């Protein structure tokens, strides 16, 4: 029954994925490990089994699993608009919500890899702790944007935006330093020879998280924030107009 359902799907991509080894999907598709773990599908030691067979053995509806996996394929392109309102909505959906999904699973996998492979000289010791630090700081950063800055920008409060934007830019710089450290710990997200599927999936997820955070920061720093900073710079001077220097 599951096989027939898969063939009826309109795209070849779904059929191809159904025949792909579950371990390879875990490595190739960031976020899929959380889906497999919740469904109790073994992507590490039992990762050589095709997804269709793995679902059949657990009595899981293949089409539903494929649909859930397809939700993890997220575009990086920005909507064709310069509207601050639309850009903020895009940031919230494409990056804020995604980071909140990414980091807990990356932390879980990092703990697992560090524990199981503690005697491996290539093990990324301290990775889970570093990811936890990044998560705490990024959650705090996003909360400030969601509660203070973004409502201000969407309401048109241009004259009040410069201060919060300056704070966010400073925190973005800190995130960049943390990303550099993340790449140092993981050899630029490159797993060692013979790494297990969990280790490889962890590094794939870290590479995706890094790309997402870089694009997130780029969108804010270079596309959203300048619209309000330029408006601030165009405001007329408020000094007395004399040469006394009080301006």
Image (cartoon, rainbow, N blue to C red):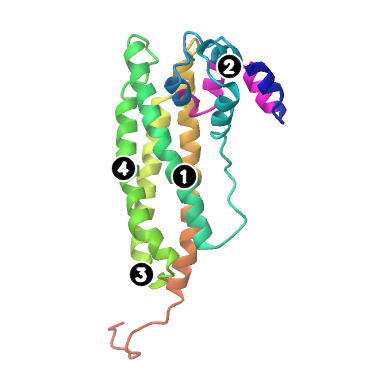
Residue name at image x 35 percent, y 17 percent: 112
Residue beneath label 1, please? Answer: 95
Q: Residues within 10 Å of mark 1 (few under 14, many from 20)?
A: many
Label 2 or label 1, whichever comes before in sequence order:
2
- The mark nearer the N terminus, 3 or 4, is 4
Which tag, 4 or 2, sits closer to the chain's start? 2
Which secondary structure dominates the residues rendered in magenta?
helix
Gap between marks 3 and 4 measured at Cα: 24 Å
Give the mark toward the camera: 2 or 1. 2
Residue for badge 3: 160
Question: Can residue 131 be seen by looking at this rendering?
Answer: yes
Q: Nearer the viewer, residue 64 or 204?
A: 64
Residue at the location (29% across, 84% down)?
A: 245
135 shown above or below 220: above
Q: Quadrant of residue 61?
A: top right
Q: Secondary structure at mark 2?
A: helix
Q: Earlier in the sequence, mark 1 or mark 3?
A: 1
Q: Is residue 215 magenta?
A: no
Q: Is residue 119 left or right of residue 227?
A: left
Q: Residues within 10 Å of mark 2 (few under 14, many from 20)?
A: many
Q: Which residue is mark 4?
A: 137
Mark 2 to mark 3 CA distance (whole Å)? 52 Å
52 vs 29: above or below: above
Depth check: 189 or 47 in front? 47
Residue sitting at 48 percent across and 47 percent down?
93
């Amino acid at each position: 029954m599951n096989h027939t359902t898969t063939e009826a799907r309109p795209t070849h991509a779904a059929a191809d994925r159904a025949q792909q080894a579950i371990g390879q999907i875990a490595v190739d598709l960031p976020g899929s490990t959380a889906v497999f773990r919740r469904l109790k599908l073994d992507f590490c030691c039992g990762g050589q089994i095709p997804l269709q067979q793995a679902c059949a053995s657990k009595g899981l509806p293949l089409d539903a699993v494929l649909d859930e996996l397809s939700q993890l394929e997220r575009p990086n392109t920005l909507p064709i608009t310069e509207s601050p309102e639309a850009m903020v909505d895009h940031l919230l959906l494409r990056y804020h919500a995604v980071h909140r999904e990414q980091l807990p699973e990356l932390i879980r996998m990092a703990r697992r890899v560090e524990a199981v492979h503690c005697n491996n000289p290539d093990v990324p010791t301290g990775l889970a702790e570093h990811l936890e630090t990044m998560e705490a700081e990024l959650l705090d950063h996003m909360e400030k944007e969601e509660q203070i800055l973004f409502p201000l920008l969407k309401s048109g409060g241009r004259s009040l935006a410069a201060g919060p934007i300056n704070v966010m830019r400073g925190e973005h710089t800190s995130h960049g330093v943390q990303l550099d450290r993340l790449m140092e710990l993981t050899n630029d997200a490159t797993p060692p020879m013979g790494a297990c599927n969990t280790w490889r999936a962890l590094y794939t997820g870290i590479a995706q998280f890094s790309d997402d955070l870089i694009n997130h920061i780029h969108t804010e720093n270079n596309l959203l924030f300048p619209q309000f900073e330029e408006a601030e710079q165009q405001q007329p001077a408020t000094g007395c107009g004399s040469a006394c220097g009080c301006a």
